[in-house]
Image: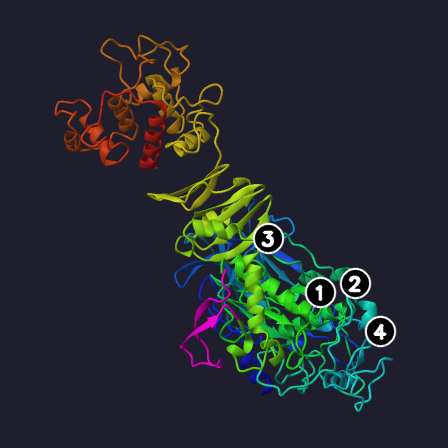
Amino acid sequence: MRRRSLIAGSALAGSALLATGVARADGEKDSRGAEEDRPPAEGGTGRRAAEPRTTAVALRDAELVERDGHPVRRVVGHPAALVGITWDEGDVEPAVSVRGLQVDGAWSPWHELEVAVDLDTGVRSSGTEPVFFADVTEVEVIGELDGADVTEGLYAHLIDFPADPKQAPMALDEGGIPADEVARERAGEGRGADGTPADPADPTASQENPERVAEESAAPEPQEGGEQSSDPGPSDGGGATGPSDGGGTTGPSDGGGVGGTGTRGTAVPALGPVPPTALVPRDLGIPGAPTLITRAQWGADEGAVRSTSSATALQSVVLHHTAGTNNYSPSQAAQQIRGIFDYHVRVLGWADIGYNVLVDRYGQIYEGRHGGLTRNINGAHALGFNTGSFGISVMGDHSSLQASAEAREAVMQVAAWKLLSTFLADVHETSSWTVGVNGTRWDRGTRVTLPRFFGHRDVNWTSCPGDALYSAMDDLRWGIQTRIDSGWRYHLRAFVDHGGASTLGSVLMSAQKEGDHTITRLSDGLIVSGPGLPARAATTTDSIRRSWRPHWGRPLEDVVHADDRYTQRFEAGMAVRENYRNRFVTPYFVDVPLTHRYFLEIHDLHEQGIIPGWPGREFRVKDDTTRNQAITFLYRLLGSPRFTPPTRSPFTDITPRHAQYREVTWAHAQGILEPYSDGTFRPSRAVRRDELSRFLYRGAGSPRWSPQRAYEFADVSSSSAYATEIAWMADTEISAGWGRWFKPGDPVNHERLAALLTRFQGVIG
């Protein structure tokens, strides 16, 4: 019952997966016992990880089914512990969700997979972060772009471990100590300075050897005095002030927890030393963020991590403490985090370590939950308030002893960066929450107002973050605001100038370097700055935001929606979303800038080889289109059909040596083109609007059409020979004229021809 109570008090019961709204408590245990994944405490034996096996499956070959209105690809016959999704290089990034059929016959929740980004290089991969399932027999995948299924172009990578890990022995790490001594140390008895079990009567026995600490740490040993215990209260597994089932301080063990009790003299693996070089904080190139120690440095076992979920907006930062000893060296701090990770993941069965960030007594900041630095990762640290919060835990017990000045400085730095980077620039503001679970300080359904920076005890029944640290909350808020005011505000200014949240929405991914640019991604927009260039903000679509690449540069305008097409100009070209696909178009013609009204139409016709342009990469937009050119471009647009031209020309003014003889005689043979009364074609004459209407109408197959619409134009009479063609042009919206005027006798210049041909192409499909 202890485990059940602990999980109930700590689970992320209300965290919904962003893509589908399917909720699962982060504190909920897997159906497989967590102890199976831990080295046993008998005989110094353990597990060696089996070699992984990866199977790649093209989802176009998988069965297509429907789940809750979503097209889903079902992958069977490939057991998996971990799944990732990729797509071809250069394709648009889809929104991907995955779930697996567990060995007990139940489906896992849906997991939204984020695109993998190398934070060192800023490169976005053509694939997602993987999701860890432990053991599933089937996998289902949703892949969408703006609500449309794109799984046909995706690949599932299913990773399993064929060798049974339960049969693979692993040598015990050096430094194993009897489990009963571990229990005494956790209970406050500890070990003496010489490494032998300490005398329980010695009040200083629980302190680490100060000489050893001094050797391991470059910082002086803070004079904090002896630790004092406080009455434990209910815990969520993050404050560590409550009872434990093997990972906490005093509770009975079932043999699986970190430091749990067992048979006297039985050795348990020590976490092992972390090389000192691994403890150097790194600058990850995240604007305004403090340096920190990464998960790789402190030794996170990424193979044991499941996918985490994220919120659409950050609301608050929550302060915790871990409890436990306050006396530890820098390398021991990393060991503690590895222990917390082991407890959260293997004992509680959480997706990952519950905190987003941890801070040690020396002011070093540690990356916590995976992916939580620039995204709004839902933690597992404050029951009912995990979605939209960012958890910072100060390592140590601060019930009666205040956190060091270095630790408090680190808390202020990371909280200020996180709030400022999500454009919450006033720590004294409040945030609104609706309690979605039982077990908090309020009844379910209650609307609660909380500060931007609050303590764990403010929302849950716990003493965390300790009386001493909690007493400093007001001072910490003041310090956070000071650091916000002097922090990295370049994207915030662009955000405010462009209308703020009412225009751009909330921050989904705070500023990070990608290539030589820095980008903030928001729910309805993006903000981009470049080297030596000010930030530009713009509204955009979900798919364009996902597709952005550094070579695009900064946005030059908000996204434009016309008909079924979304377009947006960037410094290097135009992003286009239509027909459920994205592309990025760069200028080719020197006289067709991005701002040209028909830029996209001209570009597309050139890309298709329909209008190659003129020497010097010119399009000559205002030049009149000749009849010869109009017929040639129409022939190419219709696929350049195979045709053997006649040996005798049907026109008196062109011969078989004419450069476009095939195209012109093809049009004549198809009934698209007729000679003038004198038998000429007049290839160099400018094509009129009524003539072009006839060419296009006949090129579309001369559909039956009423000429009535043409008579609505003041310059088209009932006797016009082109009335049917003009009516068809207007009704199909290839050309609706200018109000009451169609201007049938006007010549068609190059830019208008591009627009008319593009619309014609859309009509015929």
Give the residue number, with chain letter if any, for mark 1. Answer: 299
At label 2, counting other C-alpha atoms closer than 10 Å, the crowd grade (few under 14, some 14-19, many 20 or more) is: few
Task: Point out the tag, 2 or 1, that comes first from the N-terminus.
Answer: 2
Indicate the secondary structure of the residue bearing disc 1.
loop
Indicate the secondary structure of the residue bearing disc 3.
loop
- The span picked out in magenta is 425-453
The majority secondary structure of the magenta stretch comes to loop
Quarter of the figure with residue 598: top left
Give the residue at x 59% y 71%. Answer: 354
Give the residue number, with chain letter if any, for mark 2. Answer: 276
Measured from the top left, where is residue 311 in percent x and y?
A: 49, 63
Measured from the top left, where is residue 564 in percent x and y?
A: 35, 44
Task: Point out the tag, 1 or 4, that comes first from the N-terminus.
Answer: 4
Vertical position of residue 721 compared to residue 527: above or below = above
* Three-letter amino acid code of the residue under disc 3: Pro
At label 3, counting other C-alpha atoms closer than 10 Å, the crowd grade (few under 14, some 14-19, many 20 or more) is: some
* Three-letter amino acid code of the residue under disc 1: Gly
Q: Is residue 45 visible?
A: yes
Whether 696 is among the magenta residues is: no
**Labels 1, 4: front one:** 4
**Labels 2, 3: front one:** 3
Mark 2–mark 4 CB contact (< 8 Å): no
Mark 2 to mark 1 CA distance (whole Å): 13 Å
